[in-house]
Amino acid sequence: MVWQDVQAIRAQAPLVLNITNYVVMNTTANALLAIGASPVMAHAIDEAEDMARIAQALVINIGTLSAPWVESMFKAGRVARERGIGIVLDPVGCGATAYRTRTAQELLREIRPTVVRGNASEIRALFRSGGNTKGVDSRDDPDDVVADAQALARSAGCVVSVSGAVDLITDGERVARVANGHVLMPRVTGMGCTASAITGAFLAVNGDAQAAAANAMAAMGIAGEIAGSTAAGPGSFQMNFLDALYHFDEMQLSTRLKLA
């Protein structure tokens, strides 16, 4: 259940290591704090392995790529894999350039993430080495890439979480859909990246990667609904979203949940 995972995150305050992009560091750190996790944003080559040794989950986000950061991603990923902690790979903009696609595929092969979380176009590009990505935005819907998501999950031995109006989460066999969310969410930068960070927190407390990924997307969507109900626009939505994560209760999560 989503509420059980939220309670566990609040009780355990898992340390989630993020090697992420400049654009979203503040946003994702605040979201992790709001839901009860402990974020660390660190990308220096010299400490990547040490940080991965003390973390309870690792989130790798390729939004603002550079060669030193990529090296840190591999270093941290290898340690995380050896330790058996949850790893989330967010292939931001995969399909937009050859460099992004190649880097994402190399990370997928070497670090073997627990969850790959991206939009539909990124997932398709990651699986097919091409795609229909518009910068970091998607031109596809999750239901357009069900077969690709399932095939990617099976070939990589991971869970694939595809965000959209209705999120799709699959381990290659099971398929879950989360219909929670709000129309203002795509108007705020970094919401997808936040979903990846939150997925890391849920993986830290739930050993069932499929359930953890689905619960994380449900929490994101429900927080979005609550935030959007009183927001005047994207600015107030972002503030309300953090407050919603912080004030989650069992009633909100159980009555609003749209998970099939």
Image (cartoon, rainbow, N blue to C red):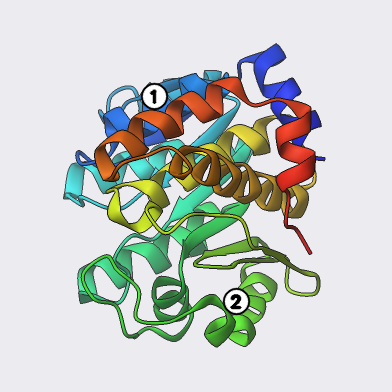
Instruction: Point out which mark residue 47 bears.
Output: none
Question: Residue 8's quadrant in the figure?
Answer: top right
Disc 1 crowd rating (10 Å Cα; few below 14, some 14-19, many 20+) is: some
Q: Secondary structure at mark 2?
A: helix
Coordinates of residue 260 in the picture (x, y in percent): 79, 64
In front of the other: 209 or 232 = 232
- In the image, taking residue 45 as reference, residue 111 lies left or right, namely right
Vertical comparison of 222 with 170: above or below: above
**Among the two numbered marks 2 and 1 on one chain, the one whose residue lies closer to the N terminus:** 1
Residue 43 appears in view = no
Coordinates of residue 236 in the picture (x, y in percent): 30, 34
Vertical comparison of 11 with 64: above or below: above
Instruction: Compute the Cα span from label 2 to label 1.
Output: 29 Å
Coordinates of residue 253 in the picture (x, y in percent): 72, 38
In front of the other: 109 or 188 = 188
Which residue is painted at 40% across and 33% down in the image?
A: 18
Which residue is painted at 81% across and 30% down in the image?
A: 4
- In the image, taking residue 177 as reference, residue 233 lies left or right, namely left
Marks 2 and 1: which is nearer the front? 1
Q: Are marks 2 and 1 in contact (CB under 8 Å)?
A: no
- Amino acid at the residue labelled 2: Ala
Label 1: which residue? 30
- In the image, taking residue 119 as reference, residue 219 lies left or right, namely right
Coordinates of residue 215 in the picture (x, y in percent): 70, 46
Which residue is painted at 34% across and 81% down in the image?
A: 139
- In the image, taking residue 49 as reference, residue 213 lies left or right, namely right
Instruction: Point out which mark residue 149 bears.
Output: 2
Residue 168 appears in view = yes
Vertical comparison of 32 with 169: above or below: above
